[in-house]
């Protein structure tokens, strides 16, 4: 059988394949080519979307800087006068900033580079015009920077271009800070910082540029603080610095307060926004900086604080303590009210006079809180009361009489009697207005605190009177050991009195004070009586304390 001619067959198949390929190519029957790979689409607002056009943008920026150097060269050569060259440079920078604001909102890279070009044109120009050529003064430089910042805010308002506004603001603040340190002229740039801060806060009241608020606030705070320190430090204003009159410094401090108090009031009261952490902290910082103004300015700032305190109380309790109002705003305003009252009154008054005023405020707040059902006012009254006792020294004197070996204070006994009268009046008001069948936990704690202050003052004065009478009867040289035992007896008797009076008068807060009184009695027994070294007096102390411990459970059972 003949074998197939494989080579001839292979040639036939190859020839047939070429003919088929030729026919498919000329009749349009060829297989479609594989589709090209599609690159992932980049969003239009993504920064990488502008990367293909980055080189032209950078090129335009370099051309802009070239124009700035051309103006500088024409000015240095005398072709343009310094003032004309400066004006041309400022207009040139503003044109670039305007060009940045005209860019579409999605082209953020273009907006940023054009804004940066405007900054790089203006800032070196003002630096050399002020320090090298002396063509403009510091006040003029500050005014130009203010115009640049506000122009940037204005032209970027419609599209909310935060990039343009931020570049303009940072340029104004940074250049002003550098010029302040270089020229040692504080006032022009301090008022520039305040004006920029005011512009930012005005925008914040309209819910714009909220993220820029800390920039203006930080610059204004540091500038006013620097001016205050330069004027009030012990060495006085350094010779290299321009004069800072006290009136101008006071104006700056009041302006700082006014800017942030006004914006906070507008945003929280008229716009209905809640207090932010920035507003709370900045108002506190503004008041603290104002307080650092020295003795010459302290009375004026204290008066301003008291007016602000009265306003905070009025706003919080007349406008904000209602269900529809923000609770954060209410508590923030009321807290500022008490803090400003304490600070302002303490600056204007001595310790004793401030304690009397705070005692009166304590009674007034507790009365008003009880009359109008405002628990926050009661709490403020309790705070005023405790601070009055501590400031007058009454609290410390009672501690010495009850727990120590102090004698009756002849020159400070007025503080004791005033403290007793104020705590008695406060507790009487608390009991008079405390008609709740089931008071809240906060109200219970408040009652206990007021009752404890009254019991503390009464027990201390009782101990002082008894020990004074002891020395009157037995002479000044009478044994101190028995005097110590007598004071331990006062605490023991106080425990019995509280255990009896609490259930009888339906005052659970008095019953709760029994055990603290016994703890204090035990502390006194261990710390004072055991170290007297007199067996008779120690026997008397142990007898009294042990008898009270034995009688208390029976007294509680009989009361129950």
Image: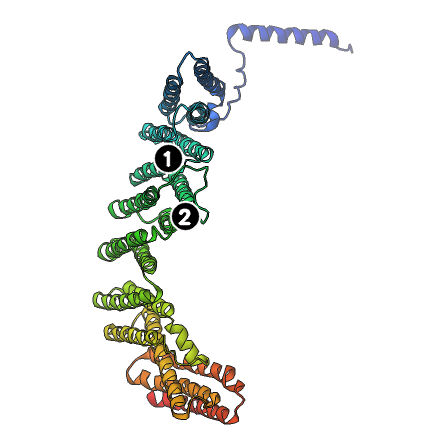
Residue 204 percent coordinates (x, y)? 32, 40
| Dot label at residue 119 | none
Q: Is residue 192 above or below residue 439?
A: above
Rendered image: mark on residue 232 = 2
**Pointer 1 with pointer 2, Cβ within 8 A:** no
Res. 444 image quadrant: bottom left
- Say if 72 sits above or below 160 in the image: above
Label 1 sits on a secondary structure element that is helix
Quadrant (top left, top right, bottom left, bottom right) of the C terminus: bottom left
Residue at (40, 89) in percent of width and height: 470
Work out how far the residue at label 1 is from the one at label 2, CA to CA, in angstroms: 19 Å
Q: From the viewer's perspective, is residue 365 above or below residue 493?
A: above
Coordinates of residue 91 in the picture (x, y in percent): 36, 20
Res 474 → quadrant? bottom left
**327 and 270: which one is in front?**
270
In which quadrant of the rendered image does the N terminus lie? top right
In the displayed structure image, the side of residue 9 where residue 138 appears, left or right: left
Quick check: can you spot residue 379? no
- Specify which label sits upstream in the sequence, 1 or 2: 1
**Which residue is nearer to you in this view: 174 or 251?**
251
Relative vertical location of residue 136 with respect to residue 14 in this rendering, above or below: below
Q: Which mark is residue 188?
A: 1
Q: Residue at x 38, y 18 (%)?
A: 88
x, y percent for residue 18 = 62, 7
């Amino acid at each position: 059988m003949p074998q197939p001619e494989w080579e001839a067959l292979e040639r036939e198949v190859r020839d047939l394949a070429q003919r088929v390929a030729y026919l498919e190519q000329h009749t349009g029957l060829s297989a479609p080519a594989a589709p090209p790979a599609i690159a992932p689409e980049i969003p239009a607002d993504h920064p990488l979307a502008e990367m293909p056009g980055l080189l032209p943008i950078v090129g335009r920026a370099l051309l802009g800087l070239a124009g700035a150097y051309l103006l500088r060269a024409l000015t240095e050569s005398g072709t343009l006068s310094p003032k004309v060259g400066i004006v041309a440079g400022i207009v040139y920078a503003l044109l670039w900033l305007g060009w940045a604001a005209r860019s579409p909102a999605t082209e953020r890279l273009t907006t940023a580079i054009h804004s940066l070009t405007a900054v790089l044109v203006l800032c070196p120009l003002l630096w050399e015009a002020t320090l090298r050529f002396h063509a403009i003064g510091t006040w003029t430089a500050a005014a130009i920077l203010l115009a640049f910042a506000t122009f940037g805010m204005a032209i970027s308002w419609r599209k909310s271009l935060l990039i343009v506004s931020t570049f303009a603001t940072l340029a104004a603040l940074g250049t002003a800070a550098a010029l302040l340190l270089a020229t040692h002229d504080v006032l022009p740039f301090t008022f520039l910082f305040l004006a920029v801060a005011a512009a930012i806060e005005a925008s914040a009241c309209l819910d714009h540029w909220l993220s820029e608020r800390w920039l203006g606030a930080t610059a204004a705070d540091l500038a006013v603080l620097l001016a205050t320190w330069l004027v009030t430090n012990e060495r006085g204003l350094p010779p290299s610095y321009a004069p800072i009159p006290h009136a101008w410094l006071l104006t700056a401090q009041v302006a700082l307060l006014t800017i942030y108090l006004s914006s906070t009031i507008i945003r929280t009261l008229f716009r209905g926004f809640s207090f932010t952490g920035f507003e709370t902290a900045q108002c506190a910082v503004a008041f603290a900086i104002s307080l650092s103004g020295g003795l010459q300015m302290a009375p004026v700032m204290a008066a301003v604080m008291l007016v602000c305190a009265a306003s905070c109380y009025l706003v919080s309790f007349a406008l904000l303590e209602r269900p529809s109002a923000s609770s954060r705003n209410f508590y923030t305003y009321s807290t500022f009210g008490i803090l400003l009252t304490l600070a302002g009154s303490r600056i204007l008054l001595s310790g004793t006079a401030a304690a009397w005023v705070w005692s009166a405020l304590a009674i007034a707040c507790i009365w008003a809180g009880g009359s109008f059902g405002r628990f926050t006012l009661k709490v403020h009254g309790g705070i005023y009361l405790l601070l009055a006792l501590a400031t007058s020294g009454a609290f410390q004197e009672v501690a010495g009489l009850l727990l120590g070996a102090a004698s009756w204070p002849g020159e400070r006994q007025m503080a004791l009697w005033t403290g007793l009268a104020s705590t008695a009046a406060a507790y009487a008001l608390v009991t008079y207005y405390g008609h709740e069948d089931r008071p809240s936990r906060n109200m219970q704690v408040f009652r206990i605190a007021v009752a404890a202050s009254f019991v503390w003052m009464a027990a201390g004065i009782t101990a002082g009177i008894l020990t004074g009478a002891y020395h009157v009867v037995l002479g000044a040289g009478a044994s101190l050991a028995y005097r110590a035992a007598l004071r331990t007896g006062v605490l023991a008797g106080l425990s019995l009195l509280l255990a009896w009076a609490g259930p009888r008068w339906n005052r659970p807060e008095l019953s709760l004070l029994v055990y603290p009184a016994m703890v204090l009695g035990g502390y006194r027994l261990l710390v004072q009586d055991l170290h007297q070294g007199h067996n008779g007096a120690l026997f008397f102390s142990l007898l009294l304390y042990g008898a009270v411990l034995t009688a208390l459970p029976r007294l509680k059972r009989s009361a129950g």
